[in-house]
Image (cartoon, helix red, strand yellow):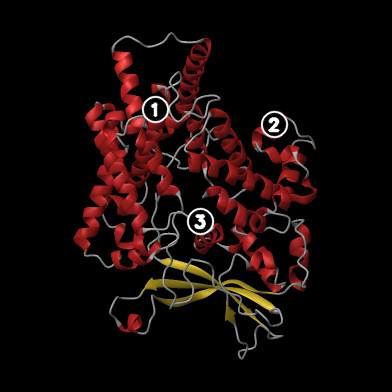
Amino acid sequence: VAFLVAYHQNKQLIGEKGLLPCKLYLQNVKKYFKGKINLDALSYAPTLIWFLDWSDMDSVLDYLSVAGLATSAFVLITGCANMVLMAVLWVLYLSLVNVGQIWWESQLLETGFLGIFLCPLWTLSRLPRSTPPSSIVIWGFRWLIFRIMLGAGLIKIRGDRCWRELTCMDYHYETQPVPNPIAYFMYRSPGWFHQFEMLFNHFIELVVPFFIFLGRRMCIVHGVLQILFQVLLIISGNLSFLNWLTIVPSIACFDDLSLGFLFSSKRGGVKDQVVQMQASRAAGKQPPLGYGCYVRKVVNISFGLLIAYLSIPVVLNLLSPRQVMNTSFNPLRIVNTYGAFGSITKERTEVILQGTSSPDPSDPTAVWEEYDFKCKPGDLKRRPCFITPYHYRLDWLMWFAAFQTYEQNEWIIHLAGKLLAQEEEALSLMATNPFAGKAPPRWIRGEHFKYKFSRPGGKHASEGKWWIRKRIGPYFPPVNLQGLKKFYEDRNWPYPVRD
């Protein structure tokens, strides 16, 4: 899914004509390090793109995405993988994330890195007899889910007071990044139910993680509870592939016995082979280990020591009253800090982009027409979308921009210029173009609105409205292409040209 998102959206976001061109970003990194691609530059932004041809950056981004899609499709369809394939996937996605600039997906990279060591080196056997998964790697996954959940719980308790007062869920369903239709109804749940949700959340994130260390049965209970919790989050929100991804390390809490019911008992099947291997081992008939097995043991021990060393600043961060979330302490993003919704916005605000063909934007008779995004709230009568595990990056970025200023998000002015020029790349990120088949708009502006869910069965809902809104004021003033020329030149962005 992540590579699919990259293939569909990276050119528009970080390509040659992207909102934040990655070529310009890498050029600035290179310039900062005295115009050289040295170890410092590679450490600051580890990516294969340093060694590829920058003359057609869109093609480079496509090559990386397609290579990742093809490799991941092979693994998914065949159910087979080895260290080489998993390392290729990890390097490819690391190369994309490290030029993304304003999105953070370290959890996927850490999970992928652990997945490398879960697999045999060369063989594509589904059941490699000589190189079973190491308990060190299994505990690496358990350590990951422990940090994800405990980090999320601690940042809440130390952050917004509404988490301590059990009132955050009074707002969350309405103010989360991209609400879905179920969130519309969950928002209207009674107060006692929201308080119960909060207590259950604190139990899952602050207490349950320690079950991992309390023996086999409690570890399995931990896995069941965490997976059920993630399923609830998937149902009630559009948090891209994040919750699906969090299920992956939770699976490491189960052993062969607890997962056996998922596999067929037919003779010669995977389950039957595992039973035979376990019987042979119990009878002392295990074949002598080869040279490769000893090498693998050394690799696994080295892997464990690396994870332990990189975990030191992460543990110190968890213990700190000034805990930071979603931060990497190493350029390869192997061991990271995690957390979610440390603060909750109490009101939902949206930036609505509007265009007009009027020569004078201050003319009170000017007709301003709105652009709708793929999924974020805009049109009051449009039903909230259901997209998980897919991810619309621009919609998420617009959510962050709505409670900041356009000066903090200059890319939104870049987007306005592209809409003025009717650039196809930018328009492909939008759900609607009010100027399709017409002359491009002369002016674009950003308006700031407060959005609220309509009440089910109420007046606005009977009119087909899922949302009601109230104007706050201008987000950014009307801009035209000519007026943006210096803005573009100062940032070395390619100036949009109307077709």
Instruction: Report x, y in % for residue 186.
Output: 29, 64
Instruction: Report x, y in % for residue 492.
Output: 77, 56
> Label 3's element?
loop
Task: Tell me the distance, in whole angstroms, between the alpha carbons under discs 1 and 2.
Answer: 33 Å
Task: Tell me the distance, in whole angstroms, between the alpha carbons under discs 3 and 1.
Answer: 29 Å
Q: Is residue 242 left or right of residue 423?
A: left
Q: Give the amino acid at mark 1.
A: Ile
**Given contact means CB atoms under 8 Å apart, are the residues at marks 3 and 1 in contact?**
no
Q: Give the amino acid at mark 2.
A: Asp
Instruction: Report x, y in % for residue 412.
Output: 62, 63
Q: Where does label 2 land, which residue?
A: 40
Label 1 vs 2, first from the N-terminus:
2
Q: Where does label 3 land, which residue?
A: 391
Task: Tell me the distance, in whole angstroms, between the alpha carbons under discs 2 and 3.
Answer: 32 Å
Which disc, if any, is residue 138?
1
Query: In this view of the protein, can residue 468 be seen by the observer?
Result: yes
Nearer to the camera, 304 or 191: 304
Q: Is residue 369 above or below residue 313?
A: below
> Label 1's element?
helix
